[in-house]
Image (tube, rainbow, N blue to C red):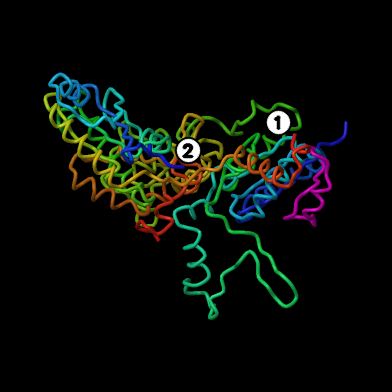
Amino acid sequence: MSNGEKTPTGFEPRIVAFFCNWCTYTASDLTGISRLIYAPNVRVIRVMCSGRIDPQFILAALREGADGVLIGGCHPGDCHYQEGNYKALRRFKLLKRFLNRMGVEDERIRLEWIAASEGDKVQKVVNEMTEQVRKLGPLHLAPIATPEAFEHEDKQELVAAGAEGESS
Amino acid sequence: MSKPKVGFNWLASCGGCEEAVVDLEEAILDVVEAVDIVFWPCAMDFKKDDVRSMADGEMDVCFVNGAIRTSEEEEMSRLLRKKTKILIAFGSCSHMGGIPGLGNFYSSESILKSSFLESPSTVNAEGVIPKTETKRSEGILTLPAFQETAKSLDQVVEVDYYVPGCPPPVKLLKDAVQAVLENKLPPKGAVLAPDVAQCTDCPRQDTKPEKLEIKEFKRPFEIEIDPKKCLLAQGLMCLGPVTRSGCDSACMKANMPCTGCLGPTSRVKDFGAKAMAGFASIIDSTDEEEIDRLLDSIVDPEGTFYRYSLPKSYMHAICTTMRNGSGKKGA
């Protein structure tokens, strides 16, 4: 299973971004208003706080086909909810250790503090990360078996054995 | 009405789940009274042909423990699925991959190499590694294939119910048998255990502080554990908050932290990820360097958080790029 889209121009990485409502998402709006162009490879999901991002979201994104995950939150001390971004930081650091062990390269997961006024930083970070992930190529997670896959295999075997009549 | 036909089988497991059946003690006599045990290779002499000769769906219930790692285990799972009306994944290994699932941190090649060539207790001068086929003058000898990853039972066949635990607590087994006998099973796919966290009925619950703040993670042998106080508050890696209840706080009552064998509640998709979220949250620091230092004090974090559930995680196993040797290896 290849996560990346193969286009005539080569591999285009798919990056899922979780941006906090108060800082980074607002910053990405500013990027647009300022007519700054950034790589279209990023799919932004707005969350109320970077502290809302469960490590499960990040793993699910990777499993569902993302080649990288970007998290954007308020600068330390600026969290709308006092300490959500610190929680995000600690979770990010711990999750990264796990992902490293699983063979997911460091550059695929990135945490950035981007304030509402830093529209240019959104552009810079997204473009930079897109290029880094492009260089790494598609993420190849270990495929997860399902009973359906086995049944499919069974049918194939039966077809190969010329026993289609019995398979129904 | 004839007695329900029941089977037990083990796959990649340690035998502890079979022990749980024996732990029924006298109650096993009631079970034997109420059901016909038609397959139980661990306790009595049964062969694969005994199962093969059954009609499809002939067995009413089959409890299967253990993960699936070899081609033989896969074949047996599928055979039992065919012959059984209600297939129950019994124990952590068939539920979530369990301890054999930790093998998914490595490639199958490195596991064989480590077990047969490199381990200090192995004498294997000829460097023999098991192969599926070996030619001898007497003919061809065969062995089951060692597959790339360990899988939970539901990744190989459809599973009707789960009885979690390492091993499953006797009460959960009794309740499951009772539910089958009285035809009071919940909707298909359910885990037959309470759907709340360990902390809900932990005897130490009252000593859990309003806000947990941990300055250093400790291992049980490093401290003298207070037998009354919340283990998390003592800095121990107790996985109770993310683990399903159902064992009557067995470990906490024995003054040991929960290791998460009963798996997550139904709201959680990835046990280890949820555990990481919880533990990262209660670290009492906002300083990058200090956070790193505190995380360093968690020994084997991946193995701690995914002790029983790596194959069922979103990751399942190491990336295929790492497996093929182009990446760094955790081994």
Report crowding for label 2: few under 14, some 14 to 19, many 20 or more residues within 10 A (C-alpha): many
Question: Which of the two residues, A79 or B55, is positioned nearer the viewer here?
Answer: B55
Q: Amino acid at mark 2?
A: Thr
Is B54 colored magenta in this rendering?
Answer: yes
Counting from the top left corner in percent of width and height, residue B42 is at: 72, 55
* Left or right: A128, with A54 as reference point: left
Where residue A33 sits, quadrant-wise, is: top left
Q: Secondary structure at mark 1?
A: helix
Residue in view at x 40 percent, y 39 percent: A3
Residue interval drawn in magenta: B36-57
Which residue, given by chain and number where applicable, does mark 2 sit on? B243
Which residue, given by chain and number where applicable, does mark 1 sit on? B179
* Left or right: B179, with B193 as reference point: right
Most extreme residue toward the top is A33
Please identify the quadrant where the C terminus of chain A is shown: top right
Q: Can you see residue A109? A: yes
Residue in view at x 79 percent, y 54 percent: B46
